Image (spheres, helix red, strand yellow):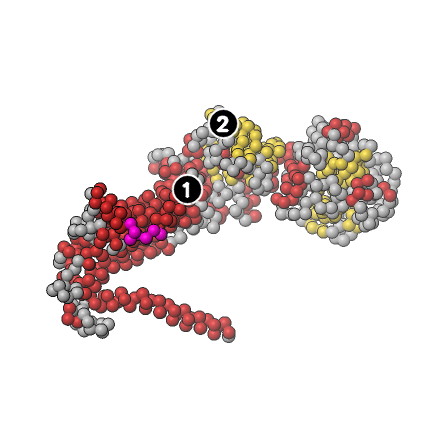
């Protein structure tokens, strides 16, 4: 049991590349902290530095109040679970789990007792005398966990321990890991690239990108109040939708329609010196079938029309996808990186697909020119250059008071090619009006 | 149908190719065995199977220290050289496979250089060195050059094996509290055992079969090895070639090799690393 403090930790490899840059994190005793980020962001390197498998270039690492920078792994009292499990193939499950205790010269009867206790927790009793080769993937994973828990260490380090399991087993094991951590109450640092795992498991999640911590906060905080474009795009599945927007006299013009900003946000944007172009972020669940939105609520967002390209029903929810011209604004390095990580090469291309999550009661169907509503309150506004979230100035607990533009006069919704759609950004992107019905018709609220 | 025809043709093709290869390899050995059982009078008899079987040749060589002492020398020198060479080679190979250190490529280059260097060119200088150091005609006089020439072979074979062992196992051992040496001895070395056995067989064979150094660096029975001893066999008169006893001795020194390989074959083939990672 111990707290782990990473104090300005930096890792530079011999070839000069910077893997981890000025990492600061205080992990409390018993806390479950997740390091998450796309591959190559330095999360595993950070974990290896905590374990003592990588040297720390500069900064100070303290475990339980002691500086351990120059201590070898065996003197740090930590246990680690590897992505590949790294079970010793020439030893039985019992020997694998007892190896650390044996090295520590623990009496055999104590080893036996501890191994059996751990095996009972993990349902491994029938397999104690088997070799790892004769176990299934899930059993091997449990042996790897067992090897860690028999030692009763100061902290557990887990390096993507679930990524080799199939989807169903992963969800099941995820719950087990969570239960185990609560039961043992041991500090745990867990590395994953899977943001679902990160959000469901962690007390606190540190999102990393290119060796730098972007934001370390509770899952809810990360989701509701992402500090920058990268965190916003990385956390959440399906990912947040990004649109380019242009500020003009307090009105935010986007291809979905025009939003009126609250004074506070407008001031913040002006103060940041961003200029007029911003990136607007809307989560899929911010959208709704306009027909299902009560008139009272309509005023908090805008309605617009879109041709539904794809319709997916999950039973409890419905996902619809439609395409929007994005203009030139949405082309930041952070979004490109996110797209590359997700396996998409076409980041920032104009005409990005927008995902919307609708209530299952919706009667919208594929190919239909549907009327959708988007809630403007949780909208995020980002600086395209720095990626900073400009809409976090509010202190009222996360709800972002972006009001729908009220000054627009009633527009016939079928008349999508109406001049108002030719907002400056839309005009720049060229052909918004070319597709009536798909183009951004600034809808009328109320 | 075409597939079946091809299969039959392939079977016949492979079958005959295999037969040719096996015949090429085995006929001289069988001929040697046959000779070892022939009486001195029948040595020139061209028939493959001896007309009259005799143990006489074996009696002759096994009842003289001219052969028994060299056999003991061969076994002793071979085993000691193999043990030391494999122990050193496994540590060197581990370093080559896992560590980054200055001069690594030089080391690998030197090892290769030694492996391809014609040994005959070294006989004279080594002979002089051994004489002045007092190593001539001693066990170490053969063991040391055998180790020197066994090492490159061992380093190359073993580093290939070490590279195949997942590095995470070693990390896991370190986190489990092992020192680097404990990690090597308890985790890496057991997993590299098939590689070590393979290397040991290769090095032992090289020592066992060596004739050049054995004949050059020995002068008496105290260190002469079996292949060299065959050279000193004498016939019943100085005009007869002791073909029968030589053949019998050749059979005798072949037997340990066969046993050695058969005994360890299983370990060589066994894929010990399966189950280490998700696989």
Residue A230 in picture, x, y percent from top left: 65, 37
Give the residue number, with chain letter if any, for mark 2.
Answer: A62
Q: Position of residue B278 (x, y in %)?
A: 48, 48
- Is B203 on the left-hand or right-hand side of B273? left
Of A239 and B209, which appears nearest the observer? B209
Instruction: Specify start and end residues of the magenta stretch as a single range.
Output: B116-122
Q: Secondary structure at mark 1?
A: helix
Label 2 – label 1 distance at C-alpha: 35 Å
The chain ID associated with circle 2 is: A
Circle 1 Cα neighbour tier, 10 Å, few/some/many (<14 / 14–19 / ≥20): some
Asked whether the viewer can see residue B72, the reply is no
Q: Is residue A267 visible?
A: yes
Q: Quadrant of residue B50?
A: bottom left
- Seen at 87% across and 40% down, the residue is A410
| B60 falls in the magenta region | no
Residue at x 43% of width, y 48% of height: B164
Residue A394: x, y in percent? Answer: 72, 28
Q: Nearer the viewer, mark 2 or mark 1?
A: 1
Position of the C terminus of chain A by quadrant: top right
- Label 1 sits on residue: B104
Q: Quadrant of residue B130?
A: top left
Residue B117 covered by magenta stretch: yes
């Amino acid at each position: 049991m111990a707290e782990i403090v990473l104090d300005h930790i930096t890792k530079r490899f011999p070839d000069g590349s910077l893997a981890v840059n000025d990492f600061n994190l205080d992990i409390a005793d018993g806390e479950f902290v997740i390091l998450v980020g796309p591959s190559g962001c330095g999360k595993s390197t950070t974990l290896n530095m905590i374990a003592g498998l990588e040297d720390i270039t500069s900064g100070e690492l303290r475990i339980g109040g002691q500086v351990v920078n120059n201590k070898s792994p065996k003197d740090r009292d930590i246990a680690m679970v590897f992505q590949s499990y790294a079970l010793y193939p020439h030893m039985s499950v019992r020997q694998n789990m007892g190896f650390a205790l044996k090295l520590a010269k623990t009496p055999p009867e104590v080893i036996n007792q501890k191994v059996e206790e751990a095996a009972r927790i993990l349902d491994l009793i029938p397999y104690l005398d088997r070799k790892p080769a004769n176990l299934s993937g899930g059993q091997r994973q449990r042996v790897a966990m067992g090897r860690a828990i028999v030692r009763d260490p100061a902290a557990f380090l887990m390096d993507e321990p679930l990524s080799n399991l199939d989807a169903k087993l992963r969800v099941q094991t995820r719950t087990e890991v969570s239960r185990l951590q609560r039961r043992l109450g041991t500090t745990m640092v867990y590395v994953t690239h899977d943001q679902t795992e990160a959000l469901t498991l962690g007390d606190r999640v540190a999102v990393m990108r290119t060796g730098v911590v972007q934001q370390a906060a509770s899952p809810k905080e990360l989701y509701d109040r992402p500090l920058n474009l990268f965190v916003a795009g990385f956390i959440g599945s399906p990912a947040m939708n990004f649109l380019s927007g242009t500020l003009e006299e307090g009105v935010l013009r986007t291809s979905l329609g025009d939003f009126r900003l609250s004074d506070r946000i407008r001031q913040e944007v002006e103060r940041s010196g961003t200029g007029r172009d911003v990136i607007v972020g809307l989560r899929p669940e911010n959208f709704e079938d306009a027909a299902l939105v009560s008139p009272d609520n309509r005023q908090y967002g805008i309605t617009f029309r879109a041709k539904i390209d794809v319709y997916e029903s999950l039973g409890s929810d419905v996902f619809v996808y439609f395409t929007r011209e994005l203009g030139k604004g949405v082309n930041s390095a952070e979004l490109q990186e996110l797209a590359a990580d997700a396996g998409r090469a076409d980041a920032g291309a104009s005409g990005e697909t927008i995902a919307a999550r609708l209530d299952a009661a919706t009667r919208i169907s594929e190919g239909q020119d549907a009327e959708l509503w988007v809630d403007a309150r949780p909208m995020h506004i980002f600086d395209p250059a720095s990626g900073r979230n400009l809409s976090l100035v509010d202190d009222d607990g996360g709800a972002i008071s972006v009001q729908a533009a009220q000054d627009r006069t009633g527009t016939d919704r079928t008349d999508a090619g109406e001049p108002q759609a030719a907002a400056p950004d839309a005009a720049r992107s060229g052909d918004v009006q070319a597709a009536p019905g798909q183009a951004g018709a600034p809808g009328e609220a109320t | 149908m075409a597939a079946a025809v091809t299969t039959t043709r392939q079977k016949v093709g492979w079958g005959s190719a295999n037969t040719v290869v096996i015949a090429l390899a085995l006929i001289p050995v069988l001929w040697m065995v046959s000779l070892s059982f022939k009486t001195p009078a029948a040595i020139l008899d061209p028939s493959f199977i001896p007309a009259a079987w005799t143990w006489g040749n074996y009696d002759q060589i096994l009842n003289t220290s001219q052969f028994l002492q060299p056999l003991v020398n061969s076994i002793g020198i071979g085993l000691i050289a193999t043990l030391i060479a494999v122990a050193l080679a496994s540590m060197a190979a581990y370093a080559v496979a896992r560590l980054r250190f200055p001069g690594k490529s030089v080391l690998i280059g030197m090892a290769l250089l030694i492996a391809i260097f014609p040994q005959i060119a070294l006989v004279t200088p080594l002979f002089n060195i051994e004489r002045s150091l007092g190593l001539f005609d001693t066990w170490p006089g053969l063991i040391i050059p055998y180790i020197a020439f066994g090492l490159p072979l061992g380093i190359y074979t073993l580093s290939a094996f070490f590279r195949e062992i997942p590095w995470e196992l070693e990390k896991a051992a370190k986190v489990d509290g092992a020192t680097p040496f404990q990690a090597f001895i308890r985790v890496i070395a057991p997993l590299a055992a098939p590689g070590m056995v393979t290397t040991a067989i290769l090095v032992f064979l090289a020592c066992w079969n060596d004739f050049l150094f054995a004949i050059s660096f020995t002068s008496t029975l105290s260190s002469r090895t079996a292949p060299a001893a065959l050279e000193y066999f004498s016939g019943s008169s100085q005009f007869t070639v002791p073909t029968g006893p030589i053949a019998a001795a050749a059979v005798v020194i072949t037997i340990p090799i066969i046993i050695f390989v058969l005994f360890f074959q299983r370990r060589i083939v066994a894929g010990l690393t399966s189950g280490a990672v998700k696989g």
